[in-house]
Image (cartoon, rainbow, N blue to C red):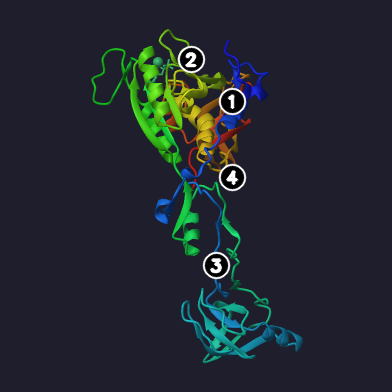
Amino acid sequence: MTTLKPLSGCVAHYDPNALPVEAAREIVRQWAIPREHEARVERVGLFDALNRVLAEDVISPIDVPAFDNSAMDGYAFAAGSLTSALASGRETVELNVAGTAFAGQPFTAQADAGQCVRIMTGALMPPGCDTVIPQELVTREGDAVRFAATAVRAGQNRRLSGEDLARGKPALRAGRIVRASDLGLLASLGIADVAVRKRIVVAFFSTGDELRSIGEPLTPGSLYDSNRYTLFAMLRRLGVETVDLGIVRDDRASLENALRRATEAADVVISSGGVSVGDADFTRELMNSLGDVAFWKIAMRPGRPLAFGRLWSGERAGAGKSALFFGLPGNPVAVMATFYFIVREALLAMSGAALQTLVAIRARAGEPVKKRAGRTEFQRGIATRDDAGQWHVVTTGPQGSGVLSSMSDANCFIVLEHARGNVEAGDEVDIVPFDGLI
Ligand code: AMP
Ligand code: MG
């Protein structure tokens, strides 16, 4: 039996042949630390910064907005006009229009008591004015504007300078994955480029004598390699650099060669297939000579055989360059489930990104679901929301870990926790939606 190395000592009381998912993730978190040195940072222009990880805090060089301005199309005036009307028992405020302020074309004269300035959204608040009455709340005759003294409160409908971002304060923190709103935010600060972490490099390959590449004829017993395409897509969406090492045959020398090349080329190596205990499954054996093994098997379905550890490019563990290694199972759905729930977090951590927790939603099971206690199951679900806002979920049907169409049909994972047994119709379950907004 493989034993856990000291780094994973905190979970040493678990059986490494059936590690609970949470314990496996804890080990992965301890091993997956970003490489810290300056060469891992580069500056990129805003259009290239999307999805990159900020290497340092971005401090706002200016106030945004840079000046007090109107949040409405209407009339700007001094709140004193309201207080004096209310104090003298008048219900209506009457003001004279002294001029107009457009966005980009300020009204620069002083608006006196009894005066107001026609103002458009985004226009600089004229000197002496602190309140805006929206245009739909006034009656206007010639230059005279009238409105109820209770229609607006002092200071309303004005955006204060610095209320979005204050000068000298961190606008975005190191570790942030740059999203659409962040690009806009950086642009609003007049920042042209940012320091981001270099992308980590992930090498991946498929193993199996039965696998064929697209374009090759399918002989009896062979099938097309789909895992490399799934992995490629999931890796690209995480923003890492990818090195595709193709299909590796089920023999010890080919696999050893692939593992060494991958370790030389990448920060992380991901393989699929060959980690179960079949006669042609050499990964386990090689890991023991080339690397440090953290665990082999996780109490999860799909995904039970999963090798995780560190590989070395030299002649033995500890020699040469190292890379983290995930030996994923061969079944296509298992590849996706283990990637999202075990690998993803590690790649983000190594990329220097702050932890991005997957969003889980509570939903009611629309049908009974078979589940065995003692392992975490990731079933493929179709979730819908009813008129009352309640989420309901059913499975996509057969849940075999080779049925890749179950992933394409689904819009969420149904996550059934370790200790849980069978689910009855109507029971609450956690679902993790496939789609995020950003
Ligand atoms: P293994 O873990 O190597 O025993 O593979 C488990 C199952 O997954 C087998 O039925 C394989 O044929 C299948 N499989 C392995 N690798 C791939 C792949 N790259 N694409 C599609 N199916 C695969
Ligand atoms: Mg195989």
User: Considering only order in the chain, which callout, 3 or 4, is on the residue closer to the N terminus?
Assistant: 3
Q: Amino acid at mark 4?
A: Gly
Q: Label 4: which residue? A: 389
Q: Secondary structure at mark 1?
A: helix
- Residue of label 2: 289
Q: Nearer the viewer, mark 1 or mark 2?
A: 2
Between 135 and 139, which is closer to the camera in this rendering?
135
Looking at this view, is 56 or 413 the one in front? 56
Q: Residue at x 55, y 46 (%)?
A: 175
Mark 1 belongs to which amino acid?
A: Ala
Classify 10 Å Cα crowding around label 1: few (below 14), some (14-19), many (20 and above): many
Residue type beneath disc 3: Ile
Task: Give the residue number, with chain letter if any, for mark 1.
Answer: 24
**Which of the two discs, 3 and 2, labels the residue nearer the N terminus?**
3
Identify the residue shown where x is 43% and y is 16%.
274
The x and y percentages for residue 18 are: 59, 17
Q: Which is more N-terminal, label 2 or label 4?
A: 2
Tell me the element at label 3. Answer: loop
